[in-house]
């Protein structure tokens, strides 16, 4: 399912316009992104939680030349599924 299909499904299930549904989906995504960028944990009980973790820089090698390079540190998003989601997917 892509974003457009998600918007259509939400509109259908809640008997609202696609425009209103799109606003809701984009608002949810923007809120999650903003919260994570501020270092907050985003928890949706039963569904799961989004968190941000920093991976420090490390040394690597260029596979073409064998030259040693430094791979910059970066923030990575992780998602941990909640109990209801795990239960629904295990059936």
Image (spheres, rainbow, N blue to C red):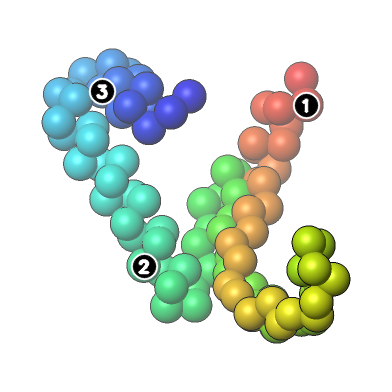
For residue 56, side relative to residue 23 (left or right): right
Q: Nearer the viewer, residue 62 or 28?
A: 62
Answer whether residue 58 is visible to the viewer in this image. Answer: yes
Q: What is the CA distance from the residue labelled 1 to the residue labelled 2?
A: 32 Å
Position of residue 68 in the picture relative to residue 31 (left or right): right
Circles 1 and 2: CB distance less than 8 Å?
no
Q: Earlier in the sequence, mark 1 or mark 2?
A: 2
3D distance between C-alphas at marks 2 and 3: 24 Å
Dot 2, how many residues are within 10 Å of its Cα: few (below 14), some (14-19), or many (20+)? few
Q: Residue 20's quadrant in the figure?
A: top left
Residue of label 2? 34
What is the x, y in percent for residue 6? 38, 27
* Residue in the picture at 71% in, 82% down: 70
> How crowded is the residue under tag 3: few (<14 C-alpha within 10 Å), some, or many (20+)?
some
Identify the residue position indicated by label 3 in the image.
Answer: 11
Residue 14 in view: no
In the image, residue 42 sits, relative to residue 71, either above or below, namely: above
Give the secondary structure at mark 3.
Answer: helix
Q: Which of the marked residues, 2 or 3, is nearer the chain's N terminus?
A: 3
Q: Residue furthest front?
A: 65
Which secondary structure, mark 2?
A: helix
Q: Are marks 3 and 1 in contact (CB under 8 Å)?
A: no
* Neighbours of disc 1 within 10 Å: few (<14), some (14-19), many (20+): few
- Which residue lies at the image location 73% right of the left edge and 32% below the top edge? 87
Image mark for residue 90 = 1
Q: Position of residue 73 (x, y in %)?
A: 64, 80
């Amino acid at each position: 399912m892509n974003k457009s299909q998600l918007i259509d499904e939400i509109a259908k299930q809640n008997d609202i316009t696609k425009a209103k549904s799109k606003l809701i989906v984009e608002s949810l995504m923007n809120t999650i992104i903003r919260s994570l960028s501020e270092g907050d944990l985003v928890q949706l009980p039963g569904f799961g939680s989004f968190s941000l973790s920093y991976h420090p820089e490390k040394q690597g090698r260029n596979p073409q030349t064998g030259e040693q390079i430094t791979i910059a540190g970066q923030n990575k998003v992780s998602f941990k599924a909640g109990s209801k989601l795990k239960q629904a997917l295990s059936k």
